[in-house]
């Protein structure tokens, strides 16, 4: 089998979001999955795939932790940045632990994105 597969991804929404976030001067991290069916696993489908809410549950689990860290940081940008990064990676871990399907593709695609970093997208 030496066939070649080409996958086209419409990442225009993600590019626009990253462009907006890069202009902000506050710590931001995005926890995302890299498979196109992740949203269907999260929210379900009209064809009977049940919602699993693995990302939502991971975010909700750490909401209070982030709120407390923001209060404690006050105006200290470095302390706030460290708290945001820690919570983002905690959310990533919990989302991976609770993602449906054990094939690994969805779980392995969950990652933290720093919108302030320079990324090149190859499509």
Image (cartoon, helix red, strand yellow):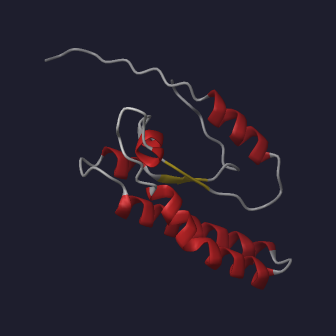
For this view, does 32 lie left or right of residue 2? right
Nearest the eye: 103 or 24: 103
Residue placed farthest to the bottom in the image?
A: 72
Which image quarter holds the N terminus? Answer: top left
Q: Compared to 79, does 97 lie above or below?
A: above
Regarding residue 28, the answer to whether it shows in the image is yes
For this view, does 94 lie left or right of residue 27? left
Q: Compared to 83, does 32 lie above or below?
A: above
Regarding residue 86, the answer to whether it shows in the image is no
Q: Compared to 50, does 29 lie above or below?
A: below
Residue placed farthest to the right in the image?
A: 75
The residue that appears at 61% across and 40% down in the rendered structure is 119
The residue that appears at 70% across and 82% down in the rendered structure is 68
The residue that appears at 62% across and 78% down in the rendered structure is 65
Residue 112 in the image: state x and y as whole percent: 54, 55
Residue 52 in the image: state x and y as whole percent: 40, 53
The residue that appears at 24% across and 52% down in the rendered structure is 102
Residue placed farthest to the left in the image?
A: 1
């Amino acid at each position: 089998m030496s066939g070649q597969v080409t996958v086209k991804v419409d990442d225009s929404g993600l590019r626009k979001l990253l462009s907006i976030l890069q202009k902000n001067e506050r710590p931001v991290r995005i926890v995302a999955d890299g498979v196109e069916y992740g949203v269907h696993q999260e929210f379900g489908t009209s064809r009977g795939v049940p919602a699993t809410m693995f990302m939502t549950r991971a975010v909700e689990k750490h909401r209070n932790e982030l709120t407390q860290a923001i209060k404690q940081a006050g105006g200290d940008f470095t302390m706030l940045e460290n708290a945001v990064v820690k919570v983002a990676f905690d959310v990533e871990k919990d989302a991976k632990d609770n993602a449906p399907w054990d094939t690994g593709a969805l779980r392995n695609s969950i990652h933290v994105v720093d919108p302030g970093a320079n990324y090149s997208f190859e499509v």
